[in-house]
Image (spheres, helix red, strand yellow):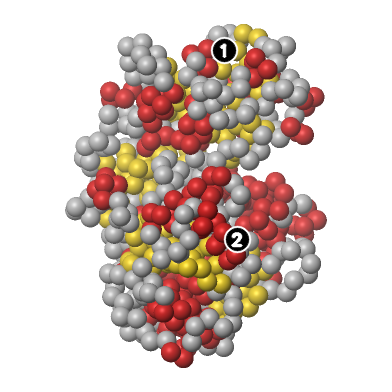
Amino acid sequence: MTTASITPRTPAQGTPRTFTDVVRERTDALAERDAFVFLPDDGQGSVPEHLTYAGLDRRARGIASWLREHRAVGRPVLLLHPPGTAFVAAFVGCLYAGSVAVPAPLPTDQGQQLARVAGILRDSGASAVLSTGAYVPLLEAWLASVALPRVRCLATDREDIGDPSSWRAPDTSPDDLAFLQYTSGSTSEPKGVMVTHTNLLANEAAIGRWAGTHEGMVVGGWLPHYHDLGLIGHLLHSLYVGGLSVQMSPLSFLKRPRRWLEMIGDYRVEGSGAPDFAYDLCLRRVTDEQLARLDLSSWRCAPNGAEPVRADTLRAFVERFSPAGLRREVFAPCYGLAETTLLVTGADPATEPTIRTVDAAALEQGVLAVGEGRTLAGSGSARDCEVRIVAPGTGAPLADGLVGEIWVRGPSVTAGYFGNEAATADCFGADGWLRTGDLGVLDAGELFVTGRLKEVIVLAGRNLYPHDIERAAQSADPSLTRGAGAAFSVRSGRADGAAGAARAAGAATEAVASAVSAASTEAVGSEREHLVLVQEVRLAAVRGGDLRAVATAAQSAIGREFAVPAGNVVLVKPGTVRRTTSGKVRRTTMRDLLLDGSLTPLYEVLEPAVRDLLGDAPDTAALDTSDTAASSNGATDAKAPGVSP
């Protein structure tokens, strides 16, 4: 077992009891400085929004007065804002009132998003909703439609909110909740993580020590404010150190990735992080002409916290953008999760990341060994916490070099899930250890994250990681969107044959070979595991419109690299593969959608046993059988109507 720890650092003189104390210190000392700048992207030449520390304090006092008047003190308050400075004022207003902020995405006309936000509203029992004037009428109508008309709404971008002069500091203690961070749910339904003021201060101290942040530092980004890195890393940490946070909307980045890099140069941003897919998107979308105009010399800390961090992305990004002044050591791979507030481990931003080439066969058996076949990027050492690798199921500590479940203990580990004692008991141990559900291995104090426990695919006694399978398939053809696939397994041969039973069986393959040897068998009696890949494809990039060739190439790439049958490939249109707010693929959700018959494939090849598991979706083979054929493993392939083979 390997552990590591650091001593938290306070952000200012004295010892603030709560994060509210920190904000008040900053607004008093830095009143006329800009606290936040938001860069709009409406195509009409709009000027940036500026919010000074004094302006933030004034607006937050008014919002807090309104919340007190409407008896929201100590109660959850839902924050549904578009990107911009109004959200920051609303969040600090909740701190000033002693209310519990609940950041969430604006509900849209997408059924999934509406259901998610309605679930958060009911789960949290929010007493009020804060938004902007443009959205309050729509939200009031939505609240009435979901039978919650008594929840009050307030537009926080108004100038006449409450009475700032009547504000009184709340009697907040360190153990009180600062906010609820609803998990993005890559393998389960979202749950409200209870983040106390003690948790938040401890994690901000750990981030500051790790990244070397300082007063006046410029932090920038585009991640949603309801995402843990976007909220804690890009917004709240800037308040913690007394810096400037420059933000743009996620949509602005996705439309024009170069704007993120231009922002870094224009505002001399020192710290800005994102999931792995964002760096890859810049690699694919920033032209040589745009690159020539970039200045990335100020960027000294670029956290990359995707699951997993891709070593080839780190190398390619540095090579591509070094002519713009990007430092080779800029990348700081890290690991964290909402249940630990944010940061758990982080690589030293002053040195190049650790890249390790390991034996693929040994890794499949739960052992980290030097060899060929897999490249892993280290996520650094523990920050303000202890990290332990244990055998799944038993919790027995494992030695360095063995893959197991990652457990974490320390002051940043949160208080559990709001109103959910059963889920809290499942993940938060009485001895302070958090069971993360992630798989990893420690080597000389550095953590290498290998995947999610519930997403490991067990075939022929081998533990395969879905992201490795997805990567291999996506390299087979340029039309297959990188980072937009979901590999998982389904089990056939159960007596009831129900899709729900297949889902439960597929989710049960949680052990790694080094810990639970019984999980190494692919079949139990007449049951059998089948590998499935659901992958987005860009039709415009398909040579000759030949989707069959694309599917065959993906199958061949998987078979060649992993020596396993890849009899099930489902090609879907862009935007089909579900993601969390942090960009992680929701593989469990994609398995459920497939088995429920909720996917509309552009082209698919399925083994008969897998096709028998599917729900009552339109059968693409029945809709158009002119291209149906049998493959060597007994699978049949079919195209959707109107799509050329």
What residue did someone put label 1 on? 635
Q: Is residue 337 left or right of residue 596?
A: left
Out of 19 and 317, give the one closest to the viewer. 19
What residue sits 54% from the left and 49% below the top? 113
Tell me, yes or no, if residue 99 can be seen here. Answer: yes
Q: Is residue 114 left or right of residue 42?
A: left
What residue sits 34% from the left and 37% below the top? 403
Out of 359 and 514, give the one closest to the viewer. 514
What percent of the width, then of the height, locates residue 602?
A: 67, 27
Disc 1 residue type?
Ala
Disc 2 residue type?
Leu
Look at the picture and state if 132 lies above or below 447. Answer: below
What residue sits 65% from the left and 14% below the top? 622
What percent of the width, then of the height, locates residue 619?
A: 61, 19
Mark 2 Cα within 10 Å, few/some/many (few <14, many 20+)?
few
Q: How many marks?
A: 2
Q: Quadrant of residue 568?
A: top right
Q: Is residue 520 left or right of residue 299?
A: left
Look at the picture and state if 645 lies above or below 69. Answer: above
Q: Nearer the viewer, mark 2 or mark 1?
A: 2
Look at the picture and state if 350 lies above or below 161. Answer: above
Q: Is residue 392 left or right of residue 235?
A: left
The alpha-carbon separation of the residues under discs 2 and 1 comes to: 48 Å
What percent of the width, then of the height, locates residue 122?
A: 41, 54
What residue sits 42% from the left and 34% below the top? 455
Residue 138's label in the rendered image is: 2
Out of 594 and 297, give the one closest to the viewer. 594
